[in-house]
Amino acid sequence: METSKQTSNHQQIKQWAEERNGVPTRIKGTGNSTSDGVLRIHFPEHSNADDFEEISWDDFFETFDDKNLNFLYQDKKEDGETSTFHKFVNKD
């Protein structure tokens, strides 16, 4: 089984996402005057974009750093296929 990895390196995260045609987004309706919203990397080829608002990589990483997050991700699925599994976790 492929193990998950963690990073906070912006270039590594961007490269991983772009290799899978992922785009930086936040979930619509989750931001307000004190919060930038919930981040996601969206893969338009695999799901509907109705719940996502595409944002720039600069905005994405500003929020990522402000929230003190790490990126947990997987390169390959158990069957060897390229994985899009990811989530954001606190650095704590």
Image: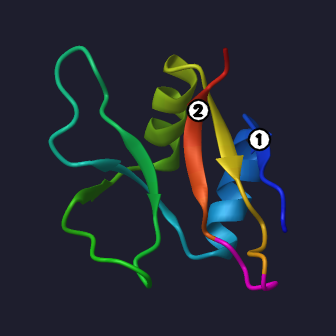
Is 9 rendered above or below residue 84?
A: above
Mark 2 vs 1: CB contact within 8 A: yes
Label 1 crowd (10 A; few <14 / some 14-19 / many >=20):
some
Is 11 rendered above or below residue 21?
A: above
Per the rendering, the mark at residue 31 is: none
80 drawn magenta: yes
Badge 1 marks a residue whose secondary structure is: strand
From the viewer's perspective, tell me whether residue 54 is left or right of residue 61.
Answer: left
Is 75 rendered above or below residue 57?
A: below
Residue type (three-letter) at the residue carrying disc 2: Val
Residue that badge 2 annotates: 89
Q: Quadrant of residue 16?
A: bottom right
> Image quadrant for the C terminus?
top right
Between residue 86 and residue 34, name the one nearer to us: 86
Residue at horizontal 24%, vertical 14%?
A: 34
Residue type (three-letter) at the residue carrying disc 1: Gln
Residue at horizontal 44%, vertical 85%?
A: 45
Percent from the top left, x then y, of residue 9? 76, 38
User: Could you tell which of marks 2 and 1 lies nearer the N-terminus?
Assistant: 1
35 drawn magenta: no
Secondary structure mainly formed by the magenta segment: loop
From the viewer's perspective, tell me whether residue 49 is left or right of residue 16.
Answer: left
Residue at horizontal 75%, vertical 48%?
A: 11
Residue that badge 1 annotates: 6
Percent from the top left, x then y, of residue 27? 28, 48
> Image quadrant for the N terminus?
bottom right
* Cα–Cα gap, marks 2 and 1: 9 Å
Give the magenta range.
79-83
Between residue 41 and residue 57, name the one nearer to us: 41
Residue at horizontal 63%, vertical 68%?
A: 18
Q: Quadrant of residue 48?
A: bottom left
